[in-house]
Image (tube, rainbow, N blue to C red):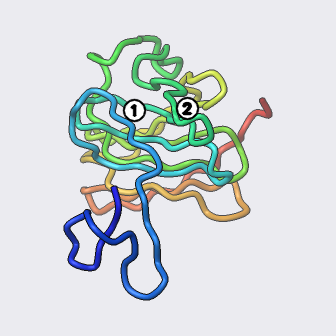
């Protein structure tokens, strides 16, 4: 896909003054709408939350699927399988460490290891959907904001993988 000044996606390959944009890759999981996406701090992975309930990791250097978090064993509550996990709403990578946090419609926040794709922590501070997640820079603190008006902070004790 090439960008054009008229916004049609065809024709010239520049927009504005000296800006070039071309489609580099196209990834698709299950055809369901994307709810949220976030890159890892090193740019090697992209986490994508789908409205179907899937949370997948894509490898950016290899432009291929790295793993499906929703189908991985859910170590935080002893069950597995996508049917038992509510819809993901938001995703956020921990800075400099191989973990991704996922906020769900049921108000839970799950922390996954990107190395094993297993859930390593479960937080239940919200009564309504988790709308936003952010790791504070240079700390082990994760913040979540919920549709219930609650802003929660978690001190994550990350194991070294």
How crowded is the residue under tag 1: few (<14 C-alpha within 10 Å), some, or many (20+)? many
Q: Farthest front residue?
A: 11
Q: Quick one: SS at disc 2?
A: strand
Image mark for residue 18:
none
How crowded is the residue under tag 2: few (<14 C-alpha within 10 Å), some, or many (20+)? many
Q: Quadrant of the C terminus?
A: top right
Label 2, label 1: how many angstroms apart (C-alpha)? 11 Å
- In the image, residue 8 sits, relative to residue 14, either above or below, namely above
Residue toward you, 104 or 117:
117
Q: What's the residue at 41%, 11% (across, down)?
A: 79
Q: What's the residue at 51%, 42% (across, down)?
A: 101
Image mark for residue 55:
1
Q: Quick one: SS at disc 1?
A: strand
**Of labels 2 and 1, the one closer to you:** 1
Question: Could you tell me if the residues under marks 2 and 1 are in contact, i.e. CB atoms within 8 Å?
Answer: yes
Q: What's the residue at 53%, 51% (across, down)?
A: 39
Q: Quadrant of the N terminus?
A: bottom left
> Horizontal placement of 102 versus 1: left or right?
right
Image mark for residue 112:
2
Residue toward you, 127 or 117:
117
Residue toward you, 54 or 84:
54
Q: What's the residue at 47%, 39% (across, down)?
A: 123
Quarter holding residue 124: top left
Position of residue 134 measured from the top left corner of the image (x, y, whole percent):
51, 58
């Amino acid at each position: 896909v090439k960008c054009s000044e008229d916004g049609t996606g065809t024709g010239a390959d520049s927009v504005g003054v000296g800006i070039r944009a071309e489609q580099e890759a196209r990834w698709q999981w299950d055809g369901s709408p994307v709810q949220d996406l976030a890159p890892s701090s090193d740019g090697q992975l992209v986490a994508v939350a789908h409205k179907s309930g899937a949370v997948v990791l894509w490898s950016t250097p290899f432009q291929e699927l790295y793993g499906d978090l929703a189908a991985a064993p859910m170590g935080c509550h002893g069950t597995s399988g996508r049917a038992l996990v509510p819809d993901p709403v938001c995703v956020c990578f921990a800075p400099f460490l191989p973990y991704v946090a996922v906020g769900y419609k049921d108000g839970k926040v799950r922390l996954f290891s990107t190395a094993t794709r297993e859930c390593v922590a479960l937080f239940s501070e919200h009564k309504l959907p988790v709308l936003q997640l952010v790791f504070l820079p240079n700390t082990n603190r994760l913040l979540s904001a919920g549709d219930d008006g609650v802003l929660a902070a978690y001190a994550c004790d990350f194991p070294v993988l």
